[in-house]
Amino acid sequence: MLKVVVCVSGGGTNLQAILDAVSAGKITNTEIAAVISNNPGAKALERAKNAGVEGICMSPKTYESRAAFNKAFTEKLTELNPDLIVLAGFLVRIPEETVHLFSNRIVNIHPSLIPSFCGVGYYGLTVHEKALERGVKVTGATVHFVNEGMDEGPIIAQKAVAVEDGDTPEVLQRRVMEQAEWILLPQAIDDIANGRIRVVDNHVCRASRD
Ligand code: GAR
């Protein structure tokens, strides 16, 4: 059984997609053990509670320094001892010590086709604003392992989504979620839980799902 901790910051629609996929048997061999939010008001914490999953709030703002937060965050994860950490809209940079401790055991969902529109400052709605500003005709989402860089780890899966005339950032964000994020992230967790994913030389090898 893959023990998963999901880290969130806001609405938690990706968390919901994961919880629903576990209930529906689309993600197997997986237990969502806890949800960590940096934001006490995150709707995601409500979603965790409704699903009977432990919700933990850890905000860098309540620590005297970022180093103190990083230490507490790493200690909390060590105590929870997950097989996989899922960053589902988690807007806090993962401490380097956590990345090293959980090497190839942290995955992130990003709302663009990496390496476009990613890196420092690209998160949430901003990503879609920038894609529209640039006038791209295709965008999408990416699930990747987390390394020391920002959105730079080995790519697990990507899905393209069309940009349509008249899109606003909000409309595009919703389409990317519906057509890509809520599908890719549960699939990646199921693939990891069932041993279909390996990292070789910093590249992901994925066995067929059937
Ligand atoms: C999602 O679109 C996710 O891809 C994005 O934040 C949103 C969270 O929504 N993550 C990033 O931008 C990370 N760089 P949610 O809380 O409803 O799942």
Image (spheres, helix red, strand yellow):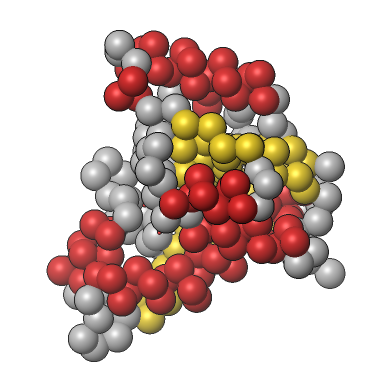
Q: In this image, 78 relative to 9: left or right?
A: right
Nearer to the camera, 113 or 35: 35
Res. 54 image quadrant: top right
Query: Where is residue 98 shown, x and y percent of the image?
Result: 53, 23
Residue 182 in sight in this render: yes
Q: Decide if residue 119 is on the left or right side of residue 71.
A: left
Q: Is residue 28 above or below residue 132?
A: above
Residue shown at 55% from the left, 66% from the top: 182
Quadrant hosting residue 131: bottom left
Residue at the spot 25% in from the left edge and 70% down from the top edge: 169
**Residue 57 vertical placement versus 29 (above, below):** above
Q: Residue 44 placed where, x, y %?
A: 49, 50
Count numbered badges in the picture.
0
Residue 88 visible in the displayed image: no
Q: Tell which of 16 and 28 is nearer to you.
A: 16
Nearest the eye: 5 or 189:
5
Compared across the picture, whether 116 is left or right of 77 comes to left
